[in-house]
Image: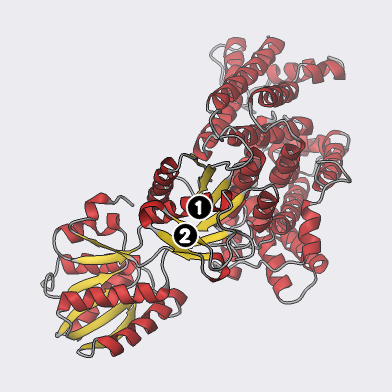
């Protein structure tokens, strides 16, 4: 009986692994459209799978690849770890895909794996999150600081009639991105909006409750306050939640950087008129066209290279192989239903 | 131990070694591994090339390394869940020291010492305070990871000397086999001899079968466990050094969740989670099986969540399958009896 049960265990293990491998094989096929010139097999490798933001960007990539007749695939680790992405970059190198469109989990940990991929002839385009500039061929940058600062100032100016007191609800006091944007916003306000007074910059530490409390404090301290700008997704949603249930709803305008899923209710009930971010779908779309241009040899990633990007028009490669997507995207009641991320 | 277990153990050893090896659980895992390799070579595009071996070993080297001491720990009936956090702590130690101008060999030595201390803390809490290892190492899993992330924050140290990062990825001569395999083979031999051919190793099995009986037969249970947790700590730290250099990146969150892959490999390799049973060759095959399967599935464009589901199912099937069979066997042998491992029953 002892031996027979052992044998049963062995058979079970064998049967299971066989079934699993068979399932795995069923998923093979059509993964790349062959080698040689114009291998337009482009695989998207987001930071992790099951992330609505990357679902949107990768769908944009798929749309672009369908337009120019390439082969789209999407792979990625379950959690946003650099080691998981290294395994996938290795795998794609083995498969000999034409290009990888990558959102990097670490600026340098992936460089060796990317180097091996490029040595094997695979083009590497980063989007959303870059690696060191010398690792990859091209980086599709979602937005630059000037554009992000300007769109938020424009939105709040429009919403409060270009006059009155405003405050900024930021992330942490030493957040590099936010501080750079705030400086640019101050410059923009001074230059083009003389009637708007920035009364205070407060910090919600990118913590929901702290941001909520700071919003309450701002509204108590400045009874004449007409608008709040929150250049952080945590801050804007906490502030919106406070405004929604307060007497200030509709009287104090709120804008900043947010995501559609987080802000949907507040936009639909009028707490927030409009906010900004980039469009991840366009980002993936542009990354796919960048990859195509590299594969077909139209560009090398050098500064000044120009390529066509379908519905988005023509783009020029900037310094360090960076391509700027364009101005941030404004979300409002009319278009928010089109987005799910 | 009960009469059935005693009789079974006796019967185990009543057969010659070659026969025991041939029909063992280990043989089943090795067979499954061979099958996965053959099927993948035939049906998965781009699998049958030397580079597959390179990437496979580079990827699973940390799992293979940590699985060695983990096997011994689990055979004593204990568990060490803090290994991946020690990998992270070791990685950060190397990174922070290197950032401050300490050369890699010295930084690596300090990291090994940190791992040894981390393991000793686990061992002390378990053997001297008498707490269960599951509770202790869940605690230190959080503690060591917290220290690692706290030391470096969300930043990473990435400026490593190319000599060392290249060494971590180097291959043996002109072959496709990474050099790290030499380290794995040497350590596997050391741990294999320790477990299977020494008094210390027989003590490990004895503790897993019954700590009381082991103690009465002269095994120093506390000392043995303490040494094993220190070994687990130091080998995890070694894996952390490799991990840091292989990816050229010291991060607090390096190798998060690796403990589960290690334990999966150990259990898949036929080691009983209740202790007392297991062998190193099976564990090595188990780790290779998980790695090869993941590699083949990735090449077949199967998504990572599906790969996790498949690996998990495989593990459950193998562990639950054998446990269930043992339970059925027990029920049939002793109708109406309690669990076979109950120490109150006498043969």
Residue B302, horizontal then vertical, whole percent: 54, 34
Q: Is residue A168 above or below residue B63?
A: below
Name the side, left or right, on which A164 lies relative to A85: left
Find residue A80 and report its horizontal and vertical position in percent.
Answer: 52, 53
Callout in the foreground (2, 1):
2
Q: Residue at x 14, y 85 (%)?
A: A224
Give the side of residue A117 with respect to residue B110, left or right: left
Q: Is residue A143 visible?
A: yes
* CB under 8 Å between discs 2 and 1: yes
Q: In this figure, which residue is indicated by the disc labeled 2?
A: A128
Provide the chain ID for the residue under circle 1.
A
Give the CA distance from mark 2 to mark 1.
9 Å
Q: Quadrant of the N terminus of chain A?
A: top right
Residue B218, given in percent of the width and then of the height, sits at 82, 39
Q: Which residue is tagged 1?
A: A47
Q: Quadrant of residue B335?
A: top right
């Amino acid at each position: 009986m002892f031996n027979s049960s052992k044998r049963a265990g062995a058979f079970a293990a064998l049967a299971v692994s066989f079934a699993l491998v068979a399932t795995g094989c069923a998923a093979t096929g059509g993964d790349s459209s062959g080698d040689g010139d114009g291998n337009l097999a482009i695989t998207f490798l987001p930071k992790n799978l099951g992330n609505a933001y990357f679902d949107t960007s990768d769908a944009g990539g798929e749309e672009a690849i369908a337009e120019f007749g390439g082969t789209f695939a999407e792979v990625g680790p379950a959690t946003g770890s650099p080691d998981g992405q290294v395994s996938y970059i290795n795998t794609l190198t083995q498969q000999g895909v034409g290009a990888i469109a990558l959102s990097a989990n670490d600026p340098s940990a992936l460089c060796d794996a990317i180097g091996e991929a490029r040595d094997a002839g695979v083009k590497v385009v980063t989007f959303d999150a870059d690696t060191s500039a010398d690792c990859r061929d091209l980086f599709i940058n979602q937005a630059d600081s000037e554009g992000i600062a300007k769109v938020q100032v424009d939105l709040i100016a429009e919403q409060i009639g270009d006059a009155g007191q405003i405050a900024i609800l930021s992330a942490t006091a030493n957040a590099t991105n936010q501080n750079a944007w705030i400086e640019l916003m101050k410059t923009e306000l001074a230059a083009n909006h003389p009637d708007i007074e920035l009364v205070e910059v407060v910090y919600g530490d990118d913590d929901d409750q702290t941001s909520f409390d700071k919003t309450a404090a701002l509204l108590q301290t400045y009874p004449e306050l007409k608008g709040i700008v929150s250049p952080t997704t945590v801050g804007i949603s906490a502030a919106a939640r406070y405004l929604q249930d307060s007497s200030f709803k509709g009287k104090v305008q709120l804008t900043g950087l947010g995501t559609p899923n987080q802000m949907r209710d507040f936009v639909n009930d009028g707490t927030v008129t409009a906010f900004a971010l980039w469009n991840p779908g366009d980002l993936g779309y542009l990354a796919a066209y960048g990859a195509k241009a590299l594969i077909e040899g139209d560009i090398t990633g050098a500064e000044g290279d120009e390529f066509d990007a379908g519905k988005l028009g023509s783009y020029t490669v900037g310094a360090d192989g960076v391509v700027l997507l364009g101005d941030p995207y404004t979300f409002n009641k009319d278009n928010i239903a089109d987005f799910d991320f | 131990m009960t009469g059935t277990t005693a009789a079974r153990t006796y019967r185990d050893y009543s057969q010659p070694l070659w026969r025991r090896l041939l029909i063992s659980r280990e043989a089943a895992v090795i067979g499954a591994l061979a099958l996965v390799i053959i099927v993948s070579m035939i049906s998965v595009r781009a699998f049958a090339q030397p580079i597959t071996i390179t990437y496979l070993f580079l990827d699973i080297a940390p799992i293979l390394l940590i699985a060695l001491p983990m096997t011994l720990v689990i055979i004593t009936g204990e568990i060490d869940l803090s290994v991946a956090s020690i990998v992270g702590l070791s990685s950060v130690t190397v990174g922070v020291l290197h950032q401050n101008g300490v050369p890699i060999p010295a930084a690596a030595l300090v990291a090994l010492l940190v791992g040894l201390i981390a393991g000793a803390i686990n061992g002390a809490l378990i053997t001297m305070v008498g707490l269960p290892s599951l509770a202790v190492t869940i605690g230190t899993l959080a503690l060591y990871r917290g220290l690692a992330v706290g030391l470096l924050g969300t930043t990473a140290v990435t400026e490593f000397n190319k000599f060392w990062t290249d060494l971590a990825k180097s291959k043996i001569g002109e072959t496709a086999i990474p050099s790290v395999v030499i380290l794995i083979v040497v350590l596997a031999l050391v741990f294999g001899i320790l477990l299977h051919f020494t008094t210390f190793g027989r003590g490990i099995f004895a503790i897993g079968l019954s700590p009381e009986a082991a103690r009465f037969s002269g095994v120093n249970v506390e000392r043995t466990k303490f040494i094993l947790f220190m070994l687990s700590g130091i080998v995890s730290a070694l894996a952390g050094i490799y991990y840091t250099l292989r990816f050229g990146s010291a991060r607090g969150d390096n190798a998060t969740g690796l403990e589960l892959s290690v334990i999966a490999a150990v259990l898949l390799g036929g080691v009983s989670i209740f202790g007392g049973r297991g062998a190193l060759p099976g564990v090595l095959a188990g780790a290779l099986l998980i790695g090869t399967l993941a590699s083949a599935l990735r090449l077949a464009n199967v998504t990572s969540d599906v790969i996790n589901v498949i690996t998990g199912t495989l593990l459950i099937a193998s562990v639950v399958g054998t446990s269930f069979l043992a339970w059925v066997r027990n029920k049939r042998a002793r109708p109406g009896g309690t669990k076979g491992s109950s120490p109150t029953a006498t043969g």
